[in-house]
Image (spheres, rainbow, N blue to C red):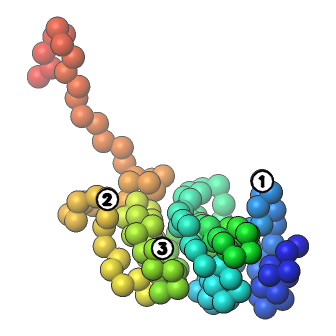
Amino acid sequence: MIPVLDTLSGQFEQVIWEKSHGQDVARVPVDDWYAFGEAAKDHGFEVCADVTAVDWMRQRPDRFEVIANLLSMSLGVRLRIITSMGRDEPTVASLTPLWPGAGFAEREVYDMFGIIFVGHPDLTRILMPDDWEGHPLRKDFGVGSVPVQFKDSHQVD
């Protein structure tokens, strides 16, 4: 393991470390999410390149995962951090106070999945209209339909 990751793993005993496609991955308990992010930033991870989510619906005990990809330009190291949360009112600490650029990605995750980022300075919809009901990337979101009228076909009433 890279020395900076050894240091981080020593600070957080509950974190599970793995490799995925050659990249280091830290599975962080949801309660340690912000503290782990803060420690990672203090150890040279200057950039939060992305924040996204996965809805596992019925495939795992914890329905949602939030994933952040961190980058240390000075050390030339990438780190993916993942946390899991349950089905009812999923919440996790915002990384935006640490990396302001994470704000837009967290808003997108909130908009699409309904995951609440505690401490986010402006957790509002970013893609869907403000009056939109629901979160379109949740696997239980109802799919609507719009009738399509093709040229030279019979009219649909």
Secondary structure beneath dot 2 equals loop
Q: Position of residue 96 (x, y in %)?
A: 47, 81
At 45% from the left edge and 80% from the top edge, which residue is drawn? 100
Residue 17 location, quadrant:
bottom right
Residue found 21% across the figure and 17% down from its top: 150
Badge 3 or badge 1: first in the primary sequence: 1
In depth, the one of 34 and 6 nearer the eye is 6
- Name the quadrant containing residue 56: bottom right
User: Label 3: which residue?
Assistant: 102
- In the drawing, does residue 77 fall left or right of residue 87? right
Q: Earlier in the sequence, mark 2 or mark 3?
A: 3
Query: Closest to the observer: 108 or 71?
Result: 71
Q: Residue 104, how many percent across, how many down? A: 40, 69
Regarding mark 3 in the picture, which secondary structure is present there? helix
The residue that mark 2 highlights is 127
Contact? badges 3 and 1 (CB < 8 Å): no
Locate residue 74 relative to residue 46 in the image: left or right: right
Crowd tier of the residue under label 2, counting other residues whose Cα lies within 10 Å: few below 14, some 14–19, many 20 or above: few
Q: Which residue is mark 1?
A: 21
Q: Please name the residue shown 15% across and 20% down the image.
A: 156
Residue 63 image-quadrant placement: bottom right
